[in-house]
Image (cartoon, coloured by chain):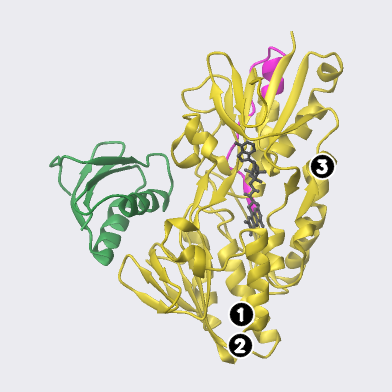
Chain colours: A green, B yellow
């Protein structure tokens, strides 16, 4: 986990949604955007970092960084 | 001055709310102090769970439809129109057919969810489903015609109505084929978009071994990207391709376009306080049922409990009392595990679901609930 900040092109605010809401919100955004777009996913679901990483590995997208912002995670994912 | 309560959407949530309010506010309605108007874009009230049974030839679509006027209390005004937008300053609703806008003092959005198969190329042409009247009938005909082959049940999008229904269909089709002695001639595969077979971990843990026991193939982390109707294949964003003879898909869902144009939330889902059901950032606007982003499943039972909470809050408010009723996330679901067995789960924001061992009695309870639904909607049960 890192605290490095990346510039995102678009943000998906999934705070308040329970699992698997945040991952599903991210997937639908990935469907909608062009290749190379960087998405910031904001999630307060405990499992999001692992789930997003697992899904990105499987689907061939890239998790750039995961920041713990105190009450939520900010996960940057690049569509490949 | 008459207080106008406007409810947009005459499905499960809107109807239960209108009927509960009519009961609660009987005196105020009689004195002309309040008026309740229910807006719905069609004449009928639809009970969607019937479609699961239509797919197996056990019910007719007409069993899930009744004129709204028969289901809704006479003290409620029904307006058949589509609500397009809200003027929050003037407190008025803009309608498609009516020239004059409709006034409101309190507004409740209960516009539900709609299907959007077009979001996945090829899905609208090739995918069957049981999430609509016509879809369920076409699926029934297709199932009856098939001698054998590969049935793929793919949960394409979440959130979707009734998270239990895809599992129910899969268990039911397996059992239906076994009962007819045809199971050997079929392969069945179930696909789900995340790393387990259901969004809720407890349900996933319960369902996974049961699917495997019944020789149902499982593909998790399968987000349908495209369907090729010619080649009869479905491909996922994760790079898996499946051949199918019959594709049964749970299509992507969105909320009503109205929610988006009224600025109440993205994708047609209204941002709400999950306990008070008040729309975030708006005065005197509530949302219930599938349209509300509460984090609980899009289920009729949740819509029902939420309607009761909002009815109490509106009544308190009207009487100048503090509104104390809150929604704790209560949801109940019967889950069919075959043609003759079912289980039951009850959960809320704090307590997870704990599916019990399926029984025949529970299956009959689900069927009995389907029958008594019309009394429930009417506010009599
Ligand atoms: C196959 C299937 C099986 C299901 N099984 C179960 C089950 O076993 N148990 C369970 O609890 N739930 C089940 N559900 C889910 C349940 O049907 C829904 O959760 C429930 O209908 C939600 O109620 P609602 O009032 O929010 O929306 P709906 O009942 O969908 O009603 C919304 C209404 O609003 C109208 N509308 C939308 N926009 C506008 C507008 N702008 N102006 C005017 N009118 C508008 C729509 O036409 C519709 O009449 C199932 C659903 C399906 C599809």
Circle 1 Cα neighbour tier, 10 Å, few/some/many (<14 / 14–19 / ≥20): many
Mark 2 highlights which residue?
A: B183
Where is residue B72 shown, x and y percent of the image? 81, 37
The disc at residue B174 is 1
Question: In the image, which disc is placed on residue B193?
Answer: none
Residue B381 is situated, as x and y percent measured from the top left of the image, at: 82, 44
**Quadrant in the rendering for residue B361:** bottom right
- Residue A19 makes an appearance in the image: no
Q: Which residue is mark 3?
A: B71
The quarter of the picture where residue B90 lies is top right
User: Which stretch did the figure color magenta?
Assistant: B314-332
Marks 2 & 1, CB-CB < 8 Å contact: yes
Q: Secondary structure at mark 2?
A: helix
Check disc 3 and report its element: helix, strand or loop. helix
Left/right of residue B96 with respect to residue B155 in the rendered view: right
The residue sitting at the top extreme is B1
């Amino acid at each position: 986990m890192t605290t490095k900040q990346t510039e995102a092109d678009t943000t998906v605010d999934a705070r308040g949604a329970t699992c698997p809401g945040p991952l599903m919100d991210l997937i639908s955004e990935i469907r909608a955007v062009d290749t190379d777009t960087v998405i910031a996913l904001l999630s307060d679901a405990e499992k999001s970092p692992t789930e997003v990483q697992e899904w990105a590995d499987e689907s061939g997208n890239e998790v750039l960084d995961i920041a713990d912002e105190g009450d939520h995670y900010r996960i940057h994912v690049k569509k490949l | 001055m008459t207080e106008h309560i406007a409810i947009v959407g005459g499905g499960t949530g809107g109807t239960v709310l209108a009927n509960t309010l009519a009961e609660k506010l009987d005196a105020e309605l009689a004195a002309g102090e309040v008026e309740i108007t229910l807006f719905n874009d069609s004449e009928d009230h639809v009970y969607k769970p019937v479609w699961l049974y239509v797919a197996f030839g056990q019910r007719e679509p007409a069993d899930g439809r009744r004129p709204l006027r028969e289901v809704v209390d006479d003290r409620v005004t029904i307006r058949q129109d589509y609500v397009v937008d809200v003027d929050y300053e003037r407190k008025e609703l803009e309608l498609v057919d009516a020239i004059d806008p409709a006034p409101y003092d309190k507004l409740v959005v209960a516009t539900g969810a709609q299907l959007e198969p077009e979001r996945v190329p090829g899905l609208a042409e090739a995918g069957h489903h049981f999430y609509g009247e016509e879809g369920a009938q076409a699926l029934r005909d297709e199932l009856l015609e098939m001698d054998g082959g590969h049935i793929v049940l793919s949960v394409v999008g979440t959130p979707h109505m009734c998270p239990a229904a895809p599992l129910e269909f899969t268990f039911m089709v397996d059992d239906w084929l076994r009962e007819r002695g045809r199971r050997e001639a079929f392969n069945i595969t179930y696909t789900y978009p995340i790393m387990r077979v259901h969004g809720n971990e407890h349900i996933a843990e319960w369902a996974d071994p049961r699917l495997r026991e019944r020789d149902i193939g499982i593909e998790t982390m399968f987000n349908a990207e495209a369907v090729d109707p010619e080649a009869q294949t479905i491909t996922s964003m994760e790079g898996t391709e499946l051949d199918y003879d019959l594709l049964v898909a749970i299509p992507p869902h969105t909320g009503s376009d109205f929610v988006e144009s009224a600025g109440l939330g993205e994708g047609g889902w209204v941002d709400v306080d999950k306990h008070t059901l008040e729309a975030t950032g708006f005065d005197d606007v509530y949302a219930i049922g599938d349209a509300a982003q509460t984090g609980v499943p899009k289920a009729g039972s949740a819509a029902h409990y939420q309607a009761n909470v909002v009815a109490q809050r509106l009544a308190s408010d009207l009487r100048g009392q503090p509104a104390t009723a809150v929604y704790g996330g209560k949801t109940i679901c019967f889950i069919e595990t075959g043609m003759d067995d079912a289980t039951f789960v009850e959960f809320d924001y704090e307590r997870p679901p704990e599916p019990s061992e399926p029984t025949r009695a529970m299956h009959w309870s689900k069927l009995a609930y389907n029958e008594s639904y019309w009394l429930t909607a009417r506010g009599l049960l």
